[in-house]
């Protein structure tokens, strides 16, 4: 962990016209890390990636890759390679020619090209496809060609721009596992741009959440999910039940809050009296039952207003008093419970106070 | 074994005498709403259109074999007029001139047109809309005006006329380039509109410089556009009469101009024979271009 960062982004901004697409972003990406830039479309994540590749020049700030300042270094001289969103597989070349292209143009010895291409294709499991043309490949296979083509150059950092967005759901999940396997196998730093939070959570070692050109939080996936540092992150990563609240009292070992719809709460957090806060609860932490649950839980009576069935689990929408809506995820654990809940049922929703996330921003 | 007969009457029992049975079945199915090719009125219309377009050409070719000087009524088959055409030195010279002008102006206008298309596709610069408008001007300006303008230009500049072949073709080549390069530019630009810029970026990302990227990535993608544009320029040049007429010197003859002067002395089958040869050249060029354009060993046209 104390290794020198392979990519260092120092107060980098990029303005198009007067608009800042990337706004004073600083980041350090560690060697061999699977790093994800996550954010809604237009948040500046792709612009940031393109600045790493050299296709955009920062308006301000510095980018260092492996300790070297990248200012004025053209894309074809950077120790990074990119997998494009459209794959950008050369349509007039065979698979093998596509993979060999980067080696040929940078003057790698002819005798070395063959084995390296073979190795790269084996790595992405495309043996036997050497003579195929891109239009004879499926989307997933084209993606693998793009990966092999970038990896064969042995970059210090591999940049991936929404690499899985064009694949269907099944293939996407398969490629997620594949990418993680590849990353561990080659030991290259991967920087992936995505708007899909599940993709980022399941693959990355660390995630930077971006919005409007700024980085909101950088953390490992579990920390990001369980400890979001602001409403925007809590809302963007997963689904959240968010309640407004106000801190009433602070004491050693906890605070007392008043939250409309929840009543008075005691949480083991810090805060300043009188401040407005948000209280967030993840839907899967919320239990649902017909009887009032026992124990030190926050429990609210309500009525089921909507059910969405997904097979392995269901989304249950419960309206408690004062028309507060609470979303609850319920695992469909047993067939015996089928039909146990119905729209219109009176029920109780409950969760442990420790599952409340206090959001001060 | 009896069931197919019940499902599709007419096929089952006589399936072995194939032609008969199958044709009957097909005739029984009614044409679907979008099966236009099976509607009689549409077929007739199509036949009429093709006849209108191609009958004159077929007759021109047919009458090149006519054994009659006046060439109005069919008198019998002969190859005499082909012999005469090949023996006609000034006709051969005109034909050679036309081919030379065609090749030169095609090469030049394809190069200029492609560069213009690339500039317009790739860059944003002040005056770009104006340039785009001006580019199309040679297409819309009446040929006669362009011919007169070019003639005035060459007279004004005192362009030397008594030059040895092929330099004496200079003014005509310049005239042809002037009106055909915009066609090339338009075709190439249309082709480039479908080009994924990420391909160029990917090439650079993989270590290629500007020139390597152009040579290995952009140019192969442009190729069908270049061929189509070049072919267009070639055909435009081969059959151009008006501009050639105004820009040719007193001594230079091109094929269309020569044919025109021959027709003035009576349309003999020799004119037909010469025209047939020109059609042959054009068709051969088209076939060649289509072969070159065919997605070689795969599909670059699909992208």
Image (tube, coloured by chain):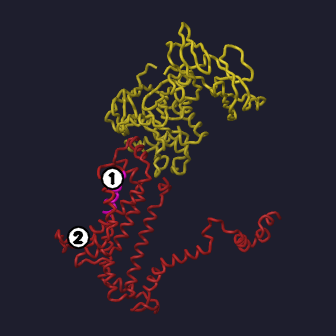
Residue A154 or B24: which is nearer the viewer?
B24
Secondary structure, mark 2, is helix
Q: Chain of mark 1?
A: B
Residue B269 position within the rendered picture, expressed as x and y whole percent measured from the top left: 40, 87
Q: Is residue B262 magenta?
A: no
| Figure check: B36 above or below B188 | below
Residue B166 visible to the viewer: no
Q: Chain of mark 2?
A: B
Residue, x 45% and y 26% (percent of image)? A31
| Residue denoted by label 1 | B119
Chain coloured yellow: which letter?
A
Residue, x 69% and y 69% (percent of image)? B30
Chain coloured red: which letter?
B
Residue B200 position within the rendered picture, expressed as x and y whole percent measured from the top left: 40, 46
Residue span colored magenta:
B105-121
- A137 left or right of B146 in image: right
Distance between the alpha carbons at the discs numbered 1 and 2: 30 Å
| Figure check: B247 above or below A159 | below
Residue A298 visible to the viewer: yes
| Residue denoted by label 2 | B167
Q: Is residue B120 magenta?
A: yes
Residue A293 or B269: which is nearer the viewer?
A293
């Amino acid at each position: 962990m104390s290794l020198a960062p392979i990519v260092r982004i120092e107060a980098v901004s990029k303005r198009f016209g007067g608009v800042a697409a990337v706004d004073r972003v600083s980041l350090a990406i560690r060697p061999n890390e699977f790093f994800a830039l996550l954010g809604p479309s237009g948040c500046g994540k792709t612009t940031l990636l393109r600045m790493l590749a050299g296709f955009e020049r920062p308006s301000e700030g510095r980018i260092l890759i492996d300790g070297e300042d990248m200012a004025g270094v053209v894309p074809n001289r950077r120790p990074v390679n990119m997998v494009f969103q459209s794959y950008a597989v050369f349509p007039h070349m065979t698979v093998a020619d596509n993979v060999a292209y980067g080696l040929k143009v940078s003057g790698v010895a002819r005798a070395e090209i063959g084995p390296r291409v073979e190795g790269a294709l084996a790595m992405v499991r495309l043996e036997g496809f050497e003579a195929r043309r891109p239009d004879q490949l499926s989307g997933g296979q084209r993606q693998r060609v793009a990966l092999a083509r970038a990896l064969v150059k042995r970059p210090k950092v591999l940049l991936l721009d929404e690499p899985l967005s064009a694949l269907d759901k099944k293939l996407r999940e398969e490629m997620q596992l594949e990418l993680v396997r590849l990353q561990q196998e080659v030991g290259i730093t991967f920087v992936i741009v995505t708007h899909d939070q599940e993709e980022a959570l399941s693959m990355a070692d660390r995630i930077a959440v971006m919005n409007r050109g700024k980085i909101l939080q950088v953390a490992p996936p579990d920390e990001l999910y369980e400890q979001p540092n602001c409403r925007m992150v809590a809302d963007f990563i997963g689904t959240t039940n968010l309640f407004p609240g106000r801190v009433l009292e602070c004491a050693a070992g906890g605070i007392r809050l008043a939250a409309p719809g929840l009543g008075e709460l005691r949480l083991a957090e810090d805060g300043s009296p009188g401040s407005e806060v948000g209280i967030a609860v993840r839907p899967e932490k919320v239990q649902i039952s017909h009887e009032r649950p026992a124990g030190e839980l926050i429990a609210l009576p309500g009525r089921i207003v909507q059910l969405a069935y997904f097979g392995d689990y269901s989304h249950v929408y419960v309206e408690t008093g004062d028309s507060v809506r609470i979303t609850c995820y319920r695992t469909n654990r047993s067939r015996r419970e089928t039909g146990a809940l119905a729209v219109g049922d009176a029920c109780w929703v409950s969760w442990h106070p420790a599952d409340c996330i206090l959001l001060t921003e | 074994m009896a069931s197919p007969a019940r499902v599709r009457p007419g096929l089952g029992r006589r399936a072995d005498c194939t032609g008969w049975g199958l044709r009957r079945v097909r005739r029984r199915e009614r044409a679907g709403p979008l099966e236009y090719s099976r509607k009689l009125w549409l077929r007739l219309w199509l036949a009429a259109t093709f006849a209108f377009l191609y009958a004159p050409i077929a007759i021109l070719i047919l009458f090149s074999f006519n054994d009659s000087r006046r060439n109005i009524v069919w008198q019998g088959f002969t190859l005499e007029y082909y012999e005469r055409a090949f023996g006609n030195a000034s006709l051969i010279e005109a034909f050679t001139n036309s081919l030379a002008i065609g090749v030169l102006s095609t090469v030049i206008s394809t190069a200029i047109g492609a560069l213009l298309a690339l500039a317009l596709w790739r860059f944003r610069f002040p005056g770009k809309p104006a340039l785009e408008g001006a580019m199309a001007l040679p297409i819309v300006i009446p040929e006669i005006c362009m011919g007169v303008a070019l003639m005035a230009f060459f007279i004004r500049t005192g362009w030397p006329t008594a030059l040895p072949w092929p330099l004496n073709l200079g003014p005509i080549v310049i005239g042809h380039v002037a009106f055909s390069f915009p066609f090339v530019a338009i075709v190439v630009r249309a082709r480039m509109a479908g080009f994924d810029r990420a391909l160029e970026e990917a090439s650079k990302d993989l270590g290629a410089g500007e020139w390597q990227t152009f040579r290995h990535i952009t140019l192969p993608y442009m190729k069908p556009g270049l061929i189509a544009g070049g072919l267009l320029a070639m055909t435009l040049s081969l059959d151009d009469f008006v501009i050639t007429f105004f820009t040719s010197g007193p001594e230079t003859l091109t094929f269309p101009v020569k044919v025109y002067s021959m027709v003035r002395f009576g349309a003999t089958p020799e004119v037909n024979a010469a025209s047939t040869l020109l059609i042959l050249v054009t068709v051969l060029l088209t076939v060649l271009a289509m072969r070159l354009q065919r997605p070689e060993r795969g599909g670059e046209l699909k992208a």
